[in-house]
Image (cartoon, rainbow, N blue to C red):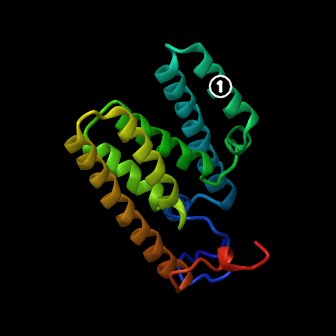
Amino acid sequence: RYGVWSGCPGTCQFGWLQHIPGMFLAWKGLDDLAIVTVLTLINALAFGWMCLAMFKELRHDPSLVSLAGLVILAGPLYAFSVYSCSEVLVTALLVGMALSLRRRGPWWISALLAFLVASSRETGLLVVAPLACAVVVTLSDNIREMIRRLAHVAVASVAGLCAVLWFNVWKYGSITNDHYTDPIR
């Protein structure tokens, strides 16, 4: 609201996935409501893409399509799809990473998506690592390929953790996000 983008201890926990576009949109002259609307549209588009990608991937097994639909509609993702926070965007990036690993896509796509998820919040690495391991281990019969894919995701995830800590220093003045360290939360 006041054009201050760094050195903001005690401000809300929005990470760089909202912060950087917000800075850009403010620089372009958009007001607060327009910025929140754009962030909400990004989230809604990510939700739509995630649903389409999951249903396309699972279309051969109707029970999985039903389960995925139930999880999406009954869980928090559907509710968060119309908010400006990045929960759905991060989940869509995580789904993209899992699909890239599942399809044995180019290593750099999986690594980039792992970096984006891991850099979205301090706990992002804790979500990326188990999911990447589960996908790669269950689909790979080649131990070298498995190790190579996991190494790319691991390096990207650690880089993502370093990026979120750097962002915290830039925004809050320390590696911790004051909002998360408040005992009431």
Q: Position of residue 69 (x, y in %)?
A: 66, 26
Q: Is residue 75 left or right of residue 65?
A: right
The number of numbered discs placed on residues in the rendered structure image is 1
Residue positioned most to the left = 144
| Image: 45 above or below 90 | above
Left or right of residue 89: residue 31? right
Residue 77 locus on image (x, y percent)? 67, 41
Q: Is there any visible trace of residue 28 in the rendered image? A: no
Q: Residue at x 53, y 86 (%)?
A: 173
Residue 38: x and y, percent? Answer: 60, 48
- Residue 178: x and y, percent? 64, 80
Q: What amino acid type is highlighted by mark number 1?
A: Leu
Q: In this rendering, is residue 181 above or below 95?
A: below
Q: What quarter of the picture does the C terminus occupy? A: bottom right
Question: Who is closer to the viewer here, 99 or 15?
Answer: 99
| Residue displayed at 55% across by 39% down | 46
- What residue is shown at x 70% (from left), y 37% (from top)? 78
Q: Nearer the viewer, residue 178 or 59?
A: 59
Front residue (pair 33, 80): 80
Q: Residues within 10 Å of mark 1 (few under 14, many from 20)?
A: few
The N terminus - image quarter = bottom right
Is disc 1 placed on a helix, strand or loop?
Answer: helix
Residue 71 visible, this angle: yes
Q: Quadrant of residue 43?
A: top right
Task: Name the residue nearer the viewer: 81 or 153.
Answer: 153
